[in-house]
Structures are given as structure tokens and as C-alpha cells.
Image (cartoon, rainbow, N blue to C red):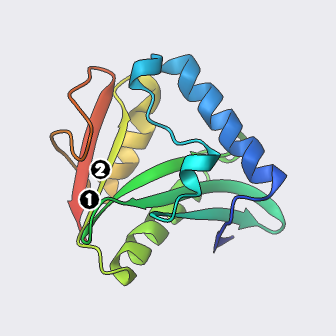
Amino acid sequence: MRVVVDDLSGPEIAELLAEHLEQMRAITPLESKHALDLDELRKPEVTFWSAIDGDVLVGCAAIKRLDAGHAEVKSMRTRPARTRGGVASMLLAHLIDEARRMGLSRLSLETGSAEFFLPARKLYEKFGFDYCEPFADYRPDPHSVFMTRQI
């Protein structure tokens, strides 16, 4: 598997992100959905990566810069057929390494509080993320959990 910067122009990544948004809308009330769409992911403050196994897209993740030293993890997604196969761990390790290379000192994230998101929360805990108060423009929300870590 390899992780590559993605310009979000391919149909496979558009499909994977559409599936991600659709699933988030089905699980989370609209006012609590914070997943970015393609146009938002193409903004200059976002760097987006895809995980490729052979020639198959298996996952994706992004970093959105919030300020000079702080960024947010966005769009972490693994194809359903590849969950529990190490894709998310590889992507998260890559994001942390890239954040260091970018000179960032802190990574934060928002994820869901529902049982569905428990595996994601466990993954973030494993990588040293601690629970925190809302950051950036987020507000307290019973459907959201906030996590952060120094890098």
C-alpha cells in the first residue's frame, strides 16, 4: 500500500467521498455533520491523501490547516471491504508524519459520539489523541466528540 497526495479529480475518489457523505448524513443529524465535500476539500488550506493498494483506492484522509501550528484531521475513510485491515492506521500515521513535516505542533479532530464511531475513537486513542473541548469554529454538540494531540 502507498499513500499519495490526491488532487481529487478522479472518479474513484469522488465516489468514495460521496459514499462517506451519504453515510454521515444517514447517521448524524444534518446540523451535526462536519464532513467536507469535494469543493471544500480542494481549498488551499487542505492537503488530501489517498491510500492505494496496487491500483485500488482503499482509503483517504486530509489535513485542514487551522493556523500556523494547528490542523484538523478530515475525511478519514476506509472502503468498507477494507476495514480492520490497517488502512486507517497507515493513513493516520502518515498524517501525523506529514503534519510534523509541515511544521505543525498540534492535530485535532471531530468525530461522532454514536456507537458507530467507537472504532474510530479507539484508533485515535491508540495514536495518542486525547479528548478535548471543541476547537476552531466547533461548538458543544451531543453528536460530536473532539480529540487532540501534540506532535
Mark 2 lies on a secondary structure that is: helix
On residue 128, the disc is: 1
Q: Residue at x 61, y 56 (%)?
A: 60
Q: Position of residue 72 (x, y in %)?
A: 36, 55
Element at badge 1? loop
Residue in front for this viewpoint, 88 or 67: 67
Picture quarter with the N terminus: bottom right
Q: In which image quadrant can residue 29 be found?
A: top left
> Disc 2 versus disc 1: distance between alpha carbons?
5 Å
Where does label 2 land, which residue?
125
Q: Amino acid at mark 2?
A: Glu
Q: Residue, x 68% and y 48% (percent of image)?
A: 82
Answer yes or no: do the residues labelled 2 and 1 have beta carbons within 8 Å?
yes
Q: Is residue 83 above or below residue 112?
A: below
Residue at image coords 50%, 65%: 44
Instruction: Determine the residue located farthest toward the left in the rendered image.
Output: 133
At which x and y percent is residue 92?
A: 45, 61
